[in-house]
C-alpha cells in the first residue's frame, strides 16, 4: 500500500513534518518497510482540510496529535 | 576583444568603540555604461565630525570621477568644500578611488589611505603607483587591467592598526604584509566579495578584542565572469501560458531553481520527468520545508516559506551578515537558494507566475497571494543592492 504525506506550504505550516516523522517511526517499529510504500508529496490541493495524508487513493485529514492513532487504525489494520 | 567581466563588490564599516556613527564612508556609483566608481574615505578623528568629512569627500569625489573630471579638480573641490575642524584647524579626509570600466580596466587613486592590495593567482600583484603632487597633497595613482579571478582590497588604516591600543594584545597592529598574507590564500576559494570582506573585517574585530580602537572599513572587489541563475515561482495566472512560461524559463542559460509545489509539478510535466520529493527532510531539525528533485532542474523547493527565509537571509546579508554561518553550509532549500543567489549568481532572472492558489486563500493560513508578490519584490530589491543584475518577468 502507498502512504503519502503532503508537505506543501500549508500542510508544512500545520506540522506535516511531525506527521511524517511519526509514520517513519511506526514503520520502522513495526517492520513495515517492505509493505508500506511511504512518500512525501508537494501540495495535494486539499489545503483547507490539511494535513493531507493519502492511503492509496483515499485522502484523509491528520494532525500531529492524531497521526499515531490514524496509523494504527487505518494502516496497521490493513496489513 | 576583452571578455566582459563582472565586478563583485563588498564593503562594510565598523565604528570605533563607543561611537555611534562611523568616521569612514564608502560611496559607490554605477554608471549607465556599466562602469563603477568606488570611493573609500576616512575622515579626520572619529564620530559625527569624521563622518561628515568622509561622507562629503566620498560623495563629491565619486560624482566628479563618474563625470570623468580629472583628479586635480576633485582634490581642489574637496579642499574648498570641507569644513575646517575647530580643534585641529584642518579640513581633512583621506580617500581611495577605484574606478572600473566594463572591460575591467581599473584606475586607482589614493590619498593618505593604506595602499590597495591586488591579489592575482594567489599572490600579491604590485600595483604600478605613480605619485604626483596636487595642491601640496601627495596623490598616488595606478592603472591596471583587471583579469578574471583578481581580488582588489582596500581598507582604512583602522584595519592595519587592528590590535593596537590600551590592553590590546598586539604591539604593532596587523600591518600591510600580514594582511596580504592573510588575504592571499582566501582568494582562490571563490568566496564572494562580500564574504571575503567580512572575513577580513572579522579578523580585525577579533584582533581588537571586539572593541575597535579606530573606525575600520574594508572594500573588496572580486573580478568574475557573469553567472546566470533563473528562479521560477508560481504557476502563470492563465493555465494556457504554462508551456510558454516553461519554455522561456528552460531556454535560459545558467542554473535553474523551481520554487513551489504546483510550479514544480508543471515543470516536471513540461520536462516529462518524475517529481521526487526527497525524504531526508525529516532528519533536519530546522523547520524548513522539504525539497524535491526533477532531472534537469538544479534545485526544486517549496515556495513561499522557503523564499521568505531567503529574504530574511538577504536582508541580514546587507546588514551584519550574521546568518552567513547558517546558510553557508546547510542543506535545506533556503540555504541552497541563498548560496546560489548571493554567492554564485551575478545575473538573476525571476519568472513569477501570478496564479492565485485557491487553497491558500483561506483566512486561517498565513500565506496569501499578495505575500508571494511582496516577497519577490523585496528579494529582488535586496539582490539589486548586492549589485546583481535583476530581471523580473510576470506571467
Image (spheres, coloured by chain):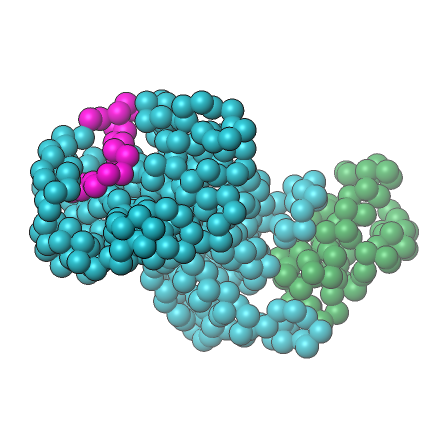
Chain colours: A green, B cyan
Q: Residue at x 19, y 37 (%)?
A: B146
Image position, residue B159 (x, y; %): 39, 35
Q: Examine the structure image and report whether residue B120 is included in the region drawn in magenta.
A: yes
Nearer to the camera, B385 or B89: B89
Q: Examine the structure image and report whether residue B324 is included in the region drawn in magenta.
A: no
Image position, residue B232 (x, y; %): 44, 59
Q: Residue at x 41, y 26 (%)?
A: B173
Identify whether B356 is placed above or below B174: below
Identify whether B352 is placed above or below B129: below
Residue A71: tell me if it is visible: yes
Image position, residue B312 (x, y; %): 54, 56
Q: Quadrant of residue B363?
A: bottom right
Q: Which residues are magenta?
A: B106-126
B252 left or right of B267 in image: left
Image position, residue B177 (x, y; %): 32, 22
Q: Residue at x 37, y 55 (%)?
A: B49
B140 left or right of B47 in image: left
Amino acid at each position: 500500500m502507498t502512504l503519502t504525506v503532503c508537505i506543501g506550504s500549508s500542510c508544512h505550516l500545520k506540522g506535516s513534518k511531525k506527521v511524517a516523522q511519526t509514520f517513519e517511526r511506526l514503520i520502522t517499529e513495526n517492520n513495515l518497510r517492505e509493505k508500506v510504500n511511504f512518500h512525501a508529496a508537494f501540495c495535494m490541493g486539499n489545503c483547507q482540510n490539511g494535513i493531507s495524508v493519502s492511503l492509496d487513493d483515499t485522502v484523509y485529514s491528520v494532525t500531529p496529535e492524531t497521526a499515531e492513532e490514524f496509523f494504527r487504525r487505518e494502516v496497521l489494520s490493513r496489513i | 576583444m576583452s571578455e566582459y567581466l563582472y565586478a563583485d563588490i563588498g564593503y562594510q564599516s565598523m565604528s570605533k568603540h563607543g561611537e555611534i556613527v562611523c568616521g569612514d564612508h564608502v560611496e559607490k556609483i554605477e554608471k549607465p555604461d556599466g562602469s563603477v566608481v568606488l570611493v573609500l574615505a576616512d575622515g579626520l578623528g572619529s564620530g559625527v565630525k569624521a563622518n561628515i568629512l568622509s561622507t562629503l569627500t566620498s560623495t563629491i569625489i565619486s560624482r566628479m570621477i563618474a563625470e570623468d573630471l580629472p583628479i586635480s579638480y576633485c582634490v581642489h573641490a574637496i579642499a574648498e568644500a570641507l569644513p575646517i575642524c575647530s580643534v585641529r584647524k584642518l579640513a581633512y579626509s583621506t580617500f581611495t578611488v577605484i574606478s572600473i570600466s566594463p572591460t575591467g580596466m581599473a584606475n586607482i587613486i589614493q590619498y593618505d589611505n593604506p595602499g590597495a592590495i591586488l591579489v592575482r593567482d594567489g599572490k600579491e600583484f604590485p600595483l604600478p603607483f605613480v605619485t604626483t603632487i596636487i595642491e601640496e597633497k601627495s596623490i598616488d595613482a595606478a592603472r591596471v587591467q583587471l583579469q578574471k579571478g583578481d581580488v582588489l582590497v582596500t581598507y582604512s588604516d583602522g584595519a592595519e592598526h587592528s590590535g593596537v591600543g590600551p590592553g590590546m594584545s598586539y604591539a604593532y597592529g596587523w600591518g600591510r604584509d600580514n594582511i596580504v598574507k592573510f588575504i592571499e590564500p582566501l582568494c582562490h576559494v571563490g568566496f564572494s566579495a562580500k564574504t571575503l570582506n567580512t572575513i577580513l573585517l572579522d579578523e580585525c574585530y577579533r584582533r581588537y578584542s571586539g572593541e575597535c580602537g579606530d573606525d575600520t572599513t574594508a572594500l573588496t572587489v572580486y573580478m568574475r565572469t557573469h553567472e546566470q541563475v533563473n528562479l521560477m515561482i508560481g504557476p502563470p495566472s492563465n493555465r494556457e501560458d504554462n508551456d510558454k512560461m516553461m519554455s522561456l524559463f528552460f531556454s535560459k542559460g545558467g542554473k535553474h531553481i523551481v520554487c513551489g509545489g504546483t510550479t514544480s509539478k508543471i515543470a516536471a510535466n513540461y520536462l516529462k520527468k518524475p517529481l521526487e520529493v526527497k525524504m531526508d527532510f525529516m532528519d533536519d531539525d530546522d523547520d524548513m520545508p522539504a525539497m524535491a528533485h526533477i532531472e534537469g532542474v538544479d534545485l526544486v523547493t517549496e515556495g513561499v516559506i522557503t523564499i521568505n527565509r531567503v529574504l530574511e537571509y538577504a536582508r541580514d546579508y546587507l546588514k551584519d551578515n550574521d546568518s552567513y554561518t547558517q546558510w553557508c553550509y546547510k542543506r535545506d532549500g533556503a540555504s541552497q537558494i541563498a548560496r546560489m543567489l548571493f554567492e554564485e549568481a551575478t545575473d538573476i532572472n525571476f519568472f513569477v507566475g501570478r496564479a492565485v492558489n485557491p487553497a491558500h486563500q483561506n483566512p486561517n493560513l498565513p500565506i496569501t497571494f499578495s505575500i508571494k508578490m511582496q516577497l519577490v519584490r523585496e528579494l529582488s530589491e535586496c539582490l539589486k543592492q548586492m549589485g546583481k543584475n535583476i530581471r523580473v518577468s510576470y506571467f
